[in-house]
Image (tube, rainbow, N blue to C red):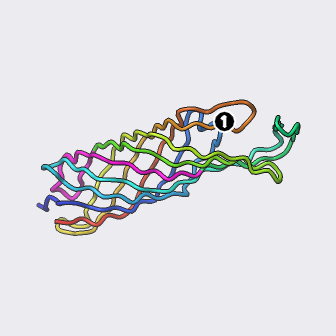
């Protein structure tokens, strides 16, 4: 029972957990994010589309010493670190049973991100902006609200790898930033 959609569009709440070097920069998970995307079915279960979003991760660190060599300054203070990102990716997904109420899928996003990394130490806001390339393998499910419903839910989990790096703190560089994301949201399903 049910129907195979021609396309669907989703708006999801995105929770990010940093890993690897990115976790050294900001070790907190963050629910401050969203993703808007769409998929168009080109064959029975194969869909292509896009994802656009916004995400922010942040953390406060107590009493670390930072040097600003060009100004001859060393500061020991609480600091606040945050990164905000605007990802944009082309996406491909394979839905195993697109005509059913619950349609599990595997997918891959390929694209880029605009990121701003900020280090706030007292009155100093040291920051850098970077563009990067990113890959995002994903598993998830599109769940219709009723066999013939045009509304549904999207639940997905993905791993994101980027070429982005952070060079802001204590002569240390964080490279190839990585994160895990949990997406939960609503979808409009078109016949």
Image position, residue 12 (x, y; %)? 41, 60
Residue segment shown in magenta: 84-105
Q: What residue is at 51 percent from the left and 44 percent from the top?
A: 131
Q: What residue is at 39 percent from the left and 41 percent from the top?
A: 136
Question: In the drawing, does residue 83 fall left or right of residue 8?
Answer: right
Image position, residue 121 (x, y; %)? 80, 48
Label 1: which secondary element: strand
Q: Is residue 135 above or below residue 57?
A: above
Along the line of sight, the residue nearer the viewer: 112 or 26:
112
Q: Is 163 part of what is drawn in magenta?
A: no
Q: What residue is at 66 percent from the left and 36 percent from the top?
A: 167
Question: In the drawing, does residue 65 fall left or right of residue 22?
Answer: right
Say which quarter of the image contains residue 7. Answer: bottom left
Residue found at the very far front of the displayed protein = 70
Image position, residue 50 (x, y; %)? 33, 53
Which image quadrant: the N terminus? Answer: bottom left
- What residue is shown with label 1? 167
Q: What residue is at 60 percent from the left and 47 percent from the top?
A: 129
Along the line of sight, the residue nearer the viewer: 187 or 176:
176
């Amino acid at each position: 029972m049910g129907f195979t959609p021609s396309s669907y569009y989703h708006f999801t709440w995105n929770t990010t957990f940093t890993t690897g070097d990115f976790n050294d920069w900001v070790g907190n998970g963050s629910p401050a994010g969203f993703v808007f995307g769409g998929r168009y079915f080109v064959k029975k279960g194969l869909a292509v589309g896009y994802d656009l979003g916004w995400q922010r991760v942040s953390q406060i660190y107590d009493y670390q010493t930072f040097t600003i060599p060009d100004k001859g300054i060393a500061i020991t203070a609480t600091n606040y670190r945050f990164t905000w990102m605007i990802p944009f990716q082309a996406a491909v997904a394979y839905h195993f049973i697109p005509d059913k109420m619950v349609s599990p899928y595997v997918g891959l996003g390929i694209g880029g991100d605009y990121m701003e990394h900020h280090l706030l130490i007292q009155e100093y806001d040291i920051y850098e902006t970077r563009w990067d390339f990113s890959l995002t393998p994903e598993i998830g499910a599109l769940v219709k609200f009723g066999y013939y419903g045009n509304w549904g839910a999207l639940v997905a989990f993905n791993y994101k790898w980027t070429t982005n790096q952070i060079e802001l703190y204590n002569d240390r560089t964080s490279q190839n930033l990585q994160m895990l994301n949990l997406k939960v949201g609503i979808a409009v399903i078109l016949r």
